[in-house]
Image (spheres, rainbow, N blue to C red):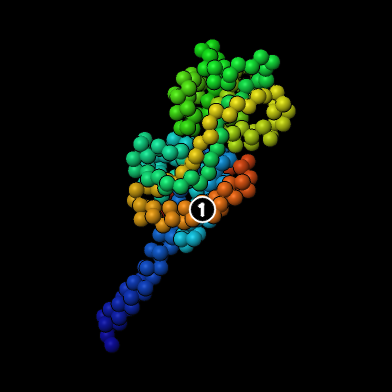
């Protein structure tokens, strides 16, 4: 056999080998889903538990990429992730490329904290007072919507730890914040809790979102989550979750994609 024929035989065998490997590598890429979520949101833990168990039933592995809330939305809506971990209903009107999975996977209270007082007005009247200096956790769409509904004039505050400190120092009169986040901060500062009054403003249901390019997953994940809901499994996972530690930060979405 001459050198040319030997080279052709080698290339043909190499081509066959690549064909055999390609389906396996494609399957590995498709088996890894990435969902964005708000960074340092303690409620993420319960949502993550629910979704990991649900997708495991579909033989799919998932990872989460915690980001600043607005950036998480933008990346998910742009298709640089497979969707969003858990957000309130109605987000799809603002981010039309996201498709809501119609099963509640978690819920949180939106609360306001103020210094304890002897004279108590109705919470809504007190908060809506024109002279109140209110701080609101920035980047929480549910708080923005609630503020509009209640007519609250809020100063957006980026760092929640600093926000509670501002309240304790009298620089703001009240702080509107997701309760799990507040509880994490108060657990680290137990002396503050006795000085503060908690006002529950609303309970918010959270839903999982898929990017429209992954609508093939909508029916199967809805079916799995519905079954988990009917069996009481979602409530069990929510109740058992320790909602005090943020989801572990992972590499960026682009970095994850490049490894697949």
Is residue 163 visible to us here?
Answer: no
Q: Please give left or right for residue 111 compared with residue 88 in the image.
A: right
| Mark 1 Cα-neighbour bin, 10 Å: few <14, some 14–19, many ≥20 | few
Q: Residue furthest front?
A: 230
Secondary structure category for the residue under label 1 = helix
Which residue shows up at 72% across the image and 26% down it?
194
Q: Residue at x 45, y 51 (%)?
A: 34
The image shows residue 65, relative to residue 162, as above or below, that is below
| Quarter occupied by residue 24 | bottom left
Which quarter of the image is occupied by the N terminus?
bottom left
x and y percentages locating residue 234 in the rendered image: 55, 50
The residue beneath circle 1 is 230
Asked if residue 139 is positioned above or below residue 104 in the image, the reply reads above
Residue 56: x %, y % from top left: 50, 59
Quarter holding the C terminus is bottom left
- Write the residue at 56% across / 34% down: 109
* Residue 97 place in picture, x, y as percent: 34, 43
- Residue lying at 40% horizontally and 59% vertically, measured from the top left: 30
Exactly how many numbered labels are in the figure? 1
Q: Can you give x and y, in whole percent of width and height, for residue 182 in the image?
A: 61, 32
Describe residue 121's horizontal placement relative to residue 74 as left or right: right
Q: Of all residues shown, which one is farthest toward the bottom?
A: 1
């Amino acid at each position: 056999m001459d050198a040319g024929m030997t080279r052709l035989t080698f290339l043909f065998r190499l081509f066959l080998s690549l064909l055999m490997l390609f389906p396996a590598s494609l399957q590995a890429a498709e088996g890894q889903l990435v969902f964005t979520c708000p960074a340092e949101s303690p409620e993420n833990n319960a949502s993550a538990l629910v979704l990991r168990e649900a997708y495991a039933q579909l033989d799919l592995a998932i990872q989460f990429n915690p980001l600043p809330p607005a950036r998480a939305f933008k990346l998910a809506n742009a298709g640089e992730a497979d969707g969003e971990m858990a957000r309130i209903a109605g987000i799809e009107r603002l981010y039309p490329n996201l498709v809501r999975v119609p099963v509640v996977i978690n819920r949180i209270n939106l609360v306001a904290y103020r210094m304890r007082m002897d004279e108590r007005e109705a919470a809504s009247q007190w908060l809506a007072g024109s002279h109140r200096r209110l701080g609101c956790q920035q980047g929480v769409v549910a708080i923005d919507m609630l503020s509009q509904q209640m007519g609250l004039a809020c100063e957006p505050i980026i760092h929640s730890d600093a926000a509670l400190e501002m309240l304790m120092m009298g620089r703001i009169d009240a702080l509107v914040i997701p309760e799990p986040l507040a509880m994490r901060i108060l657990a680290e500062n137990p002396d503050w809790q006795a000085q503060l009054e908690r006002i529950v403003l609303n309970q918010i249901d959270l839903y999982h979102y898929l990017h429209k390019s992954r609508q093939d997953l909508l029916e199967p994940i809805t079916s799995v989550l519905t079954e988990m809901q009917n069996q009481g499994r979602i409530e069990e996972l929510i109740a058992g979750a320790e909602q005090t530690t943020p989801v572990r930060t992972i590499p960026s979405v682009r970095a994850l994609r490049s490894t697949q």
